[in-house]
Image (cartoon, rainbow, N blue to C red):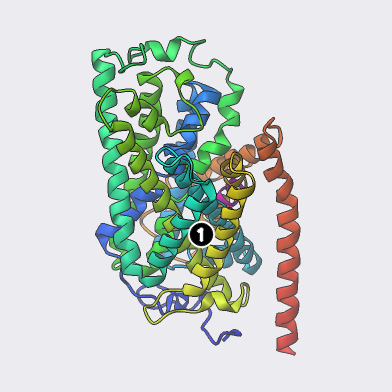
Amino acid sequence: MDSLGLKSAVGAKGADGVTAGDEGYAKSLTNRQIQMIAIGGAIGVGLLLGAGGRLQFVGPGLVLSYAISGVAAFFVMRALGELVLHRTTSGSFVEYAREFIGPWAGFASGWMYWLNWAMTGIAECTAAAIYVSRWLPDVPQWITALVALGVLLVVNLLSVKLFGELEFWFALVKVLAIVVFLFVGLALITTGASVGDTGHHAGIGNLTEHNGFLPNGFPVVLMALQGVIFAFAAIEMVGIAAGETDNPRKVLPKAINSVVVRIAVFYVGSILLLALVLPWTMYSGNESPFVTVFSHLGVPAAGDIMNAVVLTAALSSCNSGLYSTARILRSLSQRGEAPAFTARMSRRQVPYGGILFTGFVYLCGVALNYWIPTDAFDIAVNVASLGIITTWMTLLFCQIQLRRKALRGEIERPSFRMPGAPYTGWATLAFLVGCLGLMAFSDDWKQQVAVALAPVLAIVLAVGWRIIETRRAGNQV
């Protein structure tokens, strides 16, 4: 028993493979909702807004950045799948880090994941405000961000079922919009049609003209990898939702495999079509590239409709951030590694303490939109990337350790396994370390700030863990 009087999550596993750390949660998420949470996590503001600025920076060669990162994301998801089938828990990789690396790793990975989503939520609220400015240009960006945050807090605090239902419809809207774009884009390219009032024709020429496929050289393809990885953030959401899923051993492998397929279609396919439909010089970071395309088609209100869709996507991702961080914080708090308040559950079986804790940080992000609205999104994205990369690295290393234990006969390895292990795991880990290294050599001051924060975060986490160990030792005396 810890200071909260709750059972330890690790090692207290029931017959269904769910840990005691999941006590108090309702199994409210259905197969339909889990599938859409998985899909929704694979379509976020990193694609719907961030791709515009990256196309402007890299050119058509951005498709290579997405393809390379997509391969890494595939292996991360399969590593997660093997871990989830080994043990389903809402603590997700925090509990896996404790089991396969050590208690300190669970503490560090949990807080780094929280940092990821705290910063991602700020980026999403900022994106929502940017989208709304298309219709209400005179409304300050921070006001729109504050309204969006208020609505999502209410939704998350009411019930898990309401969250699942709202996320289902959010994700459905995103998927339908991307599918429509894919069909429209393919039609424009196959017919070589003129794209509305732009004077440009869709086709292969847009990949080779305007200084070619790599107008700014190949190094920028590598420099864009960190931002592209942010675009894939949230695909691991399905692992956190496992603890509140009915029949996870049947549902989760399908959900994980579906994410992998959609990464190939929605991300790589969409970027390629964007580069084919219009010259890369027509995109910018001030507007979703999908809105850019539909605004020039000549169809009344097409641009506004797509803008509403990408607004929905931003709200969806922020919604998911509040959900996931609350579960991670509760898992940490049960061990005395986060404020006790974050473990509190409502009568509706919602961890409202963690939701409110993260919501307060999102509120600080609203203030960021007040002080520096033009840089708020990029700053949040770059800091969030540190959390994303460390989370993915944790999942990969835990899977490597799981396999080692299975080979020693200590545990049984699930049938849903990481392909090519352990070589694919080590190769993906090396790739992620390389992405961190590239950030250090970037000319973008916002990336340099994020890299400079890394040692500071390491020191803070080390001191925090030392304090926790000292407190525990004192309690045992």
Amino acid beneath label 1: Leu
* Outermost front residue: 138
Q: Position of residue 422 (x, y in %)?
A: 52, 47
Is 177 located above or below residue 18 in the figure?
above
Is residue 145 placed above or below 327 in the rendered structure? above
Residue at 71% of width from left, 32% of height from top?
441
The quadrant holding residue 150 is bottom left
Q: Is 156 on the left-hand or right-hand side of 250?
A: right
The reply, left or right, for residue 228 in relation to residue 33 is: right
Q: Quadrant of the N terminus?
A: bottom right
Residue displayed at 57% across by 85% down: 4
Q: Residue 217 is drawn in which quadrant?
A: top right
Provide residue 301's location: percent of width, then percent of height.
Answer: 28, 33
| Magenta: main secondary structure | helix
Residue 137: give x, y in percent of width and height. 46, 39
Q: Is residue 82 something that shows in the picture?
A: no
Q: Position of residue 25 (x, y in %)?
A: 39, 75
Please state the extent of the stretch shown in magenta in the rendering. 384-391
Q: Residue 136 lies in magenta, yes or no?
A: no
Residue that label 1 marks = 402
User: From the viewer's perspective, is 125 left or right of 182?
Assistant: right
Is residue 55 among the parts visible in the rendering? yes
